[in-house]
Amino acid sequence: MELELHPDLEPLRFLLGTWEGAGVGGYPTIEGFHFGQEISFTHIGKPFLVYASRTWLIEEDGSLGRPLATETGYWRPRPDHQVEVTLAHPTGIVEIYLGNVAFNRVELVTDVVARTESAKEVTGGKRLYGLIGEDLGWAYDMAAVGQQLQSHLSAQLKRVS
């Protein structure tokens, strides 16, 4: 049985599905790298999207390497094309993003970053998700470990379901 999409989710409908592809990462404190990624946006008929992402290293020879980051969360549309996003990371970091949705594009900026005592120091982030033709492109800027907000990750993904 297919669940009916809650009407509040209409501006985020373009995100629904499972997306796979590849991206690049880098930061002043690490070596650059290539990664594979799978993102899913699903719903259960309520006014939020369920989000999950997992990534893995792509080795220099193109083979799949070790698992990298994973995150899960919820995307909650608000009035006037606003959106709230909560993300949890198994590394002890929780983020709350606020942003807006327009023309198959979502821009998000951290409102709160909380972390456990053992987590890496992350102090802020900015994310952009949007359609590039039929693909989903996204970019993540991060402020962490004494560095100011700057580019960290980006990827282009194809819808697989």
Image (cartoon, grey):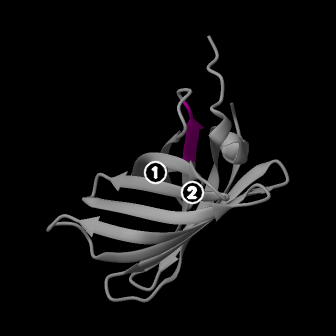
- Given residues 6 and 54, the one toward you in this image is 6
Q: Is residue 152 magenta?
A: no
Magenta stretch secondary structure, dominant: strand
Q: At 34% across and 69% down in the image, what residue appears? A: 113
Q: Is residue 116 left or right of residue 84?
A: left
**What residue is shown with label 2?**
83
Answer above or below: position of 157 versus 29: above
Answer above or below: position of 4 versus 155: above
Q: Secondary structure at mark 1?
A: strand
Q: Is residue 119 left or right of residue 109?
A: left
Q: At 56% across and 27% down in the image, what residue appears? A: 45
- Taking the view exactly as shown, the residue that stands out farthest to the left is 117
Q: On the image, which quarter does residue 96 sit in?
A: bottom left
Quick one: quadrant of the N terminus?
Answer: top right
**What residue is shown with label 1?**
65
Label 1 Cα neighbours within 10 Å, binned few <14 / some 14-19 / many ≥20: some
Q: On the image, which quarter does residue 47 sit in?
A: top right
Q: Secondary structure at mark 2?
A: strand
Q: At 67% across and 58% down in the image, what residue appears? A: 81
Residue 140 visible in the shown view? yes
Image coords of residue 151 (percent x, y):
55, 79
Image coords of residue 79 (percent x, y):
62, 54
User: Alpha-carbon distance for marks 1 and 2?
Assistant: 34 Å
Residue 68 visible in the shown view? no
Which segment did they paint magenta?
A: 38-43
Task: Residue type at mark 1: give it.
Answer: Gly
Task: Residue type at mark 2: give it.
Answer: Val
Image coords of residue 70 (percent x, y):
41, 50
- Given residues 80 and 27, the one toward you in this image is 80
Label 2 Cα neighbours within 10 Å, binned few <14 / some 14-19 / many ≥20: many
In primary-sequence order, the first of circles 1 and 2 is 1
